[in-house]
Amino acid sequence: MRRVPEHPRRVATVRNASGSLFGLAYGDALGKPTEFQTYESIVARYGPGGPRDLEGDPALVTDDTQMMLAVGEALVEADAITPDAYEPVLRRAFLDWAASPDNNRAPGMTCLRACADLTDGRPWQRASQLHSKGCGANMRVTPLGLIPGLTEDQRAGAAQLQAGLTHGHATGLAASEATAFAVLWLADGLDPQELVGALRDRCNAQRGTYREEWLGDLWQRPGVDSPAQFIAEGWDETDAALARVEAALRRGTLEGDPCLATGEGWVAEEALATALYCYLISPEEPVAVLGRGAATSGDSDSIACLAGAFAGAALGMAAWPDEWQHRIEYAQRLRALGDAWSG
């Protein structure tokens, strides 16, 4: 069993929280213009390293950053991080996002459908899109890895809850929890080279754990006999994606389109895997990590935003050019979240 940092009374520093939050937004902005392009067309414009500088003033982001802010601001607003306290605040934040005039960045249909169903006050399990494991489940979960003072159950349960409000597939839940813990462990100082192994250990340890307090009866659907059977599929698919990361890194052939090694990132476990792959090729070169994530043939903005969240969690604000924080959209809200979690 691999060792990961244990900090039950952990206090996240503003350096780690802000570095990860801004890194996510930077990756999102760099990946925004390359999403839906072929790898060849991206390389023709930017070179094999992908885009390396923000475009525009401000540099615009996508729904990935918008929804991440909704998750994070709901954490700050909630009276407690419990299912009963967090869910209604998060629901309201998602509905505010759905109705916002700024929600014009080609948001995912799963999120839009779920938000439409959430408007009438029905139990969120009845609004969740049960068969979707799209990357919208985990491109927004980073704040759950950064907020200080949570127990393991709170962090895992809330990470799965925020995914489940829109994406009800077990793999969306498991991959979201894994993403949150990757951010947590990197911010706590885990050696990046140990990260995939630690995540695979968690997949194995958690595969029979259904967090009923947080998820209620979400597991119930035709063909599923038990909560444990339901959630095990999610952890097994997430573990298989992480195994592909290990294999790709071991092969050592690190050039070309990352999606060919670990998947296009349209679904949650592939978004996690390909973002990790882009990060772990050169974890000490954070801007290169962003460019690599953006130079992908798949869901480039989601891949790059998660890769940026990982790099920023490990290296803090020092990872990024100073002037970027004044050029990115939503800079004030990003800074406020980092300040809120400064301890």
Image (spheres, grey):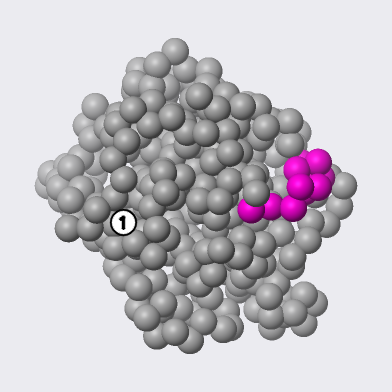
Residue 72 point in image, percent of width and height:
54, 31
Say if 243 sits above or below 69 in the image.
below
**Residue at 86% in and 52% down:** 56
Residue at image location 74% in from the left, 67% down from the top? 51
Name the quarter where the N terminus is drawn: bottom left
Examine the rendered structure and indicate whether residue 252 appears above or below residue 132: below
Quadrant of the rendered image containing residue 340: top right
Q: Residue furthest right?
A: 57
Q: Horizontal and vertical percent for residue 204?
A: 19, 56
Q: Is residue 125 left or right of residue 232?
A: right
User: Mark 1 — residue?
Assistant: 199
Q: Nearer the viewer, residue 330 or 198?
A: 198
Residue 82: percent from left, percent from top: 34, 21
Residue type, numbered disc 1: Leu
User: For the magenta stretch, what is the residue range?
Assistant: 319-329
Residue in the foreground of this view, choosing between 46 and 236: 46
Q: Between residues 180 and 212, which one lies in front from this camera angle? A: 180
Q: Position of residue 91 (x, y in %)?
A: 49, 26
Q: Is residue 202 magenta?
A: no
Residue 274 visible in the picture: no
Q: Residue at x 28, y 40 (%)?
A: 6
Number of numbered discs overlaid on the protein picture? 1
Secondary structure at numbered mark 1: helix
